[in-house]
Amino acid sequence: MCNKYAKSNTKEPMIPHDIIKQPWQKVGIDLYELNGHVYLIIVDYYSKYPEIVTLNKDLTTHNIIKHMESIFARHDIPRIVMSDSAKQFNSQEYKTFAREWNFQIKLLFQE
């Protein structure tokens, strides 16, 4: 069965990134679910250090921003935040947050 569909299952091309020379200048952010709990993860591109918080099923942009503010207060405000195009990371509220906190949003995938 795998051989039958192997050609239609092509690899995605690698997406190159600029080399980061300092911690917490560029981070990746995503939401994931594990054992019925939803988490926000932010990973520093330089050190690969992760920050993980539970969202307690509150997936609103407002709640995500609240946790991001706390994490940025501990580490620093990154210059670039990479994410997918989930509605929370593509909302006007999130774009306003990025502008006010002076970081650039980079979406990995466009829907």
Image (spheres, rainbow, N blue to C red):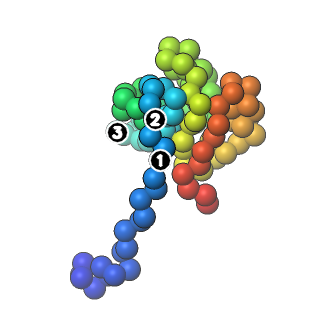
Q: Is 22 drawn above or below residue 32 in the view shown?
A: above
Expressed as whole percent of the image width and height from the top left, the position of residue 55 reads 50, 29
Identify the image quadrant of the C terminus: bottom right
Residue 79 visible, this angle: yes
Give the residue type that dot 3 points to.
Asn
Residue 33 tag number: none
Query: Could you tell me how far apart the alpha carbons at marks 3 and 1 are, in whole angstroms?
Result: 32 Å
Mark 1 touching mark 2, by CB under 8 A? Answer: yes
Which numbered disc, 3 or 1, marks the residue that appears first in the sequence? 1
Q: Is residue 66 left or right of residue 53?
A: right
Residue under pointer 2: 20
Residue 79 relative to residue 13: left or right: right
Res 103 → quadrant: top right
Element marked by disc 3: loop
Q: Give the camera-side residue of 28 and 92.
A: 28
The N terminus: image quadrant:
bottom left
Is residue 56 visible from the viewing direction of this image? no
Measured Cα–Cα span from mark 1 to mark 2 = 9 Å
Going by the image, does 17 lie left or right of 90?
left
Q: Amino acid at mark 1?
A: His
Name the residue tied to disc 3: 35
Q: Viewer-proximal residue, 35 or 109? A: 109
SS at mark 2 in the image: loop
Residue 25, compared with residue 1, is above or below; it is above
Q: Are marks 3 and 2 in contact (CB under 8 Å)?
A: no
* Image x and y of residue 83, in percent: 54, 44
The residue beneath circle 1 is: 17
Mark nearest the camera among 3 and 2 is 2
Q: In 3D space, how far apart are the residues under numbered discs 3 and 2 (Cα atoms)?
A: 34 Å
- In the image, residue 37 lies at what x, y percent? 42, 35
